Image (spheres, rainbow, N blue to C red):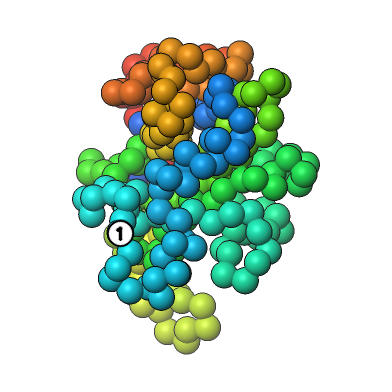
Amino acid sequence: MLIAAAFFASLEAYRFKKIEKIGPTKIPPVTATIPAVASSVSAAIQSTFNVWEDLSRTNFSGTFKNKFPASSKWSHFFLFPNSDAPGSLFPQDELILLDRGNDEFIPRYVAIPASLRKDDLYLYEPTGDQYWSSEYSYRGQPAKFRCSFLIHMEPAGGTATRLDIFEYQPEIWVGKRFGFLAHAILPGMFYDIRLVEPTTSDRVELLELIQKSVAAGLSLGLGEFRRLPCGGYDRSLTSYDWRGVEGVSGLASDPDTPVRF
């Protein structure tokens, strides 16, 4: 009897892991209006980040020149266009909704008319092995985090473009857990990887990289970027102030206060 109780207790032990998240209690959207047409914004993004098609042209040889240093998490990411063409890994709407995890913004993305998403880009790390430190912690140490990004662009009047950054499949890796694998007869230890809520800092970082690229390409000052009334990001290029988010209520009084779950 005691052995059985201990066995079932070990199966449930993973539920009691102490995982914390730093950031706003209400996760804000990360969006901006950029003073450039969508084609210019898209070109700036593709000039900044690695493009999968460029890598495939080299037959995945060592001749491909990465646009980021190896120490940067962005060196592992590649852009894919919104296309049904062979080789494109841009996820279809049905898959996006099925695999969105705890991301409440994804249904809003899929609800955008397809005609307005035709120029969107998917920023994806294809190996599934790359994690980095972000807003989550486990046992007082940064938890391993990863996600992909959906970059939405649509006209915002005149020559401006509205840019929205969405995270797709945000997850953390918090050690191992004891349990049953799919189709396994006996239990065992396996990696404890969990889908989580999206982060704000990673989306802000991506948006600011895009802003810098567009500004450099068009010789603009960063002060010429306009923030939407409902915008959810801080334009600082050096830090993110959770308390400075517009249109968001319920922020923790201290930006470094952990949110436990």
- Horizontally, residue 245 falls left or right of residue 142, namely right
Above or below, 135 against 33 in this view is below
| Residue found farthest to the bottom | 185
Q: How many marks?
A: 1
- Horizontally, residue 6 falls left or right of residue 53, namely left
Mark 1, secondary structure of its residue: loop
Depth order, front residue of 215/198: 215
Looking at the image, can residue 68 be seen? yes
The picture places residue 61, in percent across and down from the top left corner, at 33, 74
Depth order, front residue of 146/16: 146
Above or below, 213 against 244 in this view is below
Q: Report the residue at 61% width, 30% height from top.
A: 37
Q: Quadrant of residue 258?
A: top left
Above or below, 90 against 222 in this view is below
Quarter that holds the N terminus: bottom left
Residue named by callout 1: 65
Q: Report the residue at 65% width, 45% height from top.
A: 119
Amino acid type at mark 1 = Lys
